[in-house]
Image (spheres, rainbow, N blue to C red):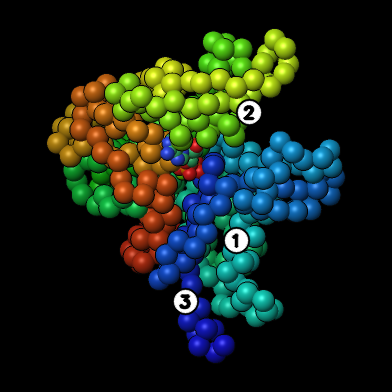
């Protein structure tokens, strides 16, 4: 027990508060929590009933007195109480020894937050982390955390570009000399892809499906270009819009790619805008070194090639893209200079 206690003493945390997933990394241990960013609470009292995977299972099935919400749905803090509850849940889990009332020393916490978060929300998140048991809480904008996480040397004078396609938002940034030179965020990412599949099947086939089914189809046979789609098919079960009765339908990967293309085109347009606004010297750097894709959306087969063709830039997907932000938070914890900069400026600018 004592060993365990000493082992735990320096457990600082990195937390990626994503719109779709929350990841927690313990310094020296690696990623120990990967859960959907969902909180289920009592509608009236706001008492938290479940957090993470358990709460996600309740989405769409909750009785009237329970509310299951995604606190960061659109890349902003949509529900502050729920965000605080989530932080408390995860920090508390690590701050208290499992199965005991033992409190280990309060951790330092680096939290990755969407770049659309306002100054007021920033302070609120910081306060929530402190209330949840953090000794110190540092906030870092997700594109910066992702850049650090994928191994970009952010202090390099040459520019690098990172595109993080998450659940609710795609965040893109050009970084150089330790700061974000330019960035954009668009509410066009994984969830919009799911919505596009739902709409496509409704309009083309008169079939009604839910969000979870749409996400499964996307992950199963979705792709960004026809060739990557290959000859895959999926049998989809839903409700016939005309009869109201269950119906199943065979759809091809090609059709799903067609469904996804408007969303992908909007993401590409935003990337092009960002490139247009980037100083020419930095564009030349990115031409040479390529842009890096991170986030769950970058797992869509062929998306790298699709973006490369549209932008005429080399594009590559980082290893384990869904972990880029939390790994970046972890690297900041291990680097006092970076940590100091986050602390002083509240945002590595
Ligand atoms: P966030 O940072 O916003 O929490 P993530 O980076 O965790 O988001 O990515 C979540 C999104 O990635 C979800 O919309 C999910 O459907 C999508 N996703 C996960 N795996 C795949 C895959 N293999 N292909 C396409 N999209 C995927
Ligand atoms: Mg993210």
The residue lying toward the viewer, choosing from 86 and 192, is: 192
What is the CA distance from the residue labelled 2 to the residue labelled 1? Answer: 29 Å
Q: Is mark 2 within 8 Å of ligand 1?
A: no
**Tag 1 secondary structure:** helix
Residue 10 image label: 3
Tag 1: Cα neighbours inside 10 Å, few (<14), some, or many (≥20)?
some
Question: Mark 3 touching mark 2, by CB under 8 A?
Answer: no
Number of the front mark, 2 or 1: 2
The answer to whether one can see residue 277 in this image is no
Question: Mark 2 touching mark 1, by CB under 8 A?
Answer: no
Q: Which residue is mark 1?
A: 90
Tag 3: Cα neighbours inside 10 Å, few (<14), some, or many (≥20)?
some
What is the CA distance from the residue labelled 1 to the residue labelled 3? Answer: 17 Å
Name the residue located 52 percent from the left edge and 35 percent from the top edge: 216
Query: Which badge, 3 or 2, comes first in the chain's sequence?
Result: 3
Q: Which residue is mark 2?
A: 210
Tag 2: Cα neighbours inside 10 Å, few (<14), some, or many (≥20)?
some
> Considering only vertical position in the picture, is 107 above or below 110?
below
Number of the front mark, 3 or 2: 2
Query: Which badge, 1 or 3, comes first in the chain's sequence?
Result: 3
Figure quadrant of residue 326: bottom left
Residue 61: image location, x then y, percent: 74, 38
Q: Quadrant of the N terminus?
A: bottom right
The answer to whether one can see residue 42 in this image is yes
Question: Mark 1 touching mark 3, by CB under 8 A?
Answer: no
């Amino acid at each position: 027990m004592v060993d365990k206690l000493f082992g735990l003493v320096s457990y600082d945390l990195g937390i990626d508060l994503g719109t779709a997933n929350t990841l927690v990394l313990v310094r020296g241990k690696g990623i120990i929590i990967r859960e959907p960013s969902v909180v289920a609470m009592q509608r009236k009292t706001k008492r938290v009933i479940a957090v993470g995977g358990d709460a996600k299972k309740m989405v769409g099935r909750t009785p009237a007195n329970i509310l299951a919400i995604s606190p960061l749905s659109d890349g902003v803090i949509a529900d502050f109480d729920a965000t605080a509850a989530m932080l408390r849940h995860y920090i508390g889990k690590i701050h208290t020894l499992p199965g005991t009332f033992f409190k280990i020393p309060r951790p330092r916490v680096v939290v990755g937050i969407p770049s659309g978060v306002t100054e007021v929300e920033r302070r609120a998140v910081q306060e929530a982390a402190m209330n949840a048991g953090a000794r110190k809480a540092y906030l870092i904008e997700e594109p910066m955390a992702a850049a650090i996480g994928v191994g970009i040397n952010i202090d390099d004078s040459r520019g690098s570009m990172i595109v993080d396609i998450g659940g609710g938002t795609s965040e893109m940034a050009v970084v150089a000399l330790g700061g974000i030179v330019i960035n954009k965020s668009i509410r066009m990412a994984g969830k919009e892809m799911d919505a596009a599949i739902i709409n496509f099947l409704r309009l083309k086939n008169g079939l009604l499906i839910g969000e979870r089914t749409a996400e499964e189809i996307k992950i199963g046979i979705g792709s960004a270009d026809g060739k990557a789609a290959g000859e895959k098919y999926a049998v989809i079960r839903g409700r016939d819009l005309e009869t109201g009765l269950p119906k199943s339908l065979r759809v091809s990967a090609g059709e799903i790619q067609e469904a996804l293309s408007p969303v992908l085109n909007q993401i590409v347009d935003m990337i092009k805008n960002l490139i247009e606004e980037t100083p020419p010297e930095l564009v030349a750097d990115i031409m040479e070194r390529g842009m890096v894709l991170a986030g769950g959306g970058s797992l869509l087969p062929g998306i790298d090639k699709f973006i490369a063709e549209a932008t005429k830039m080399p594009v590559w997907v980082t290893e384990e893209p869904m972990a880029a932000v939390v790994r970046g938070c972890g690297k900041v914890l291990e680097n006092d200079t970076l940590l100091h900069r986050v602390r002083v400026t509240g945002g590595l600018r």
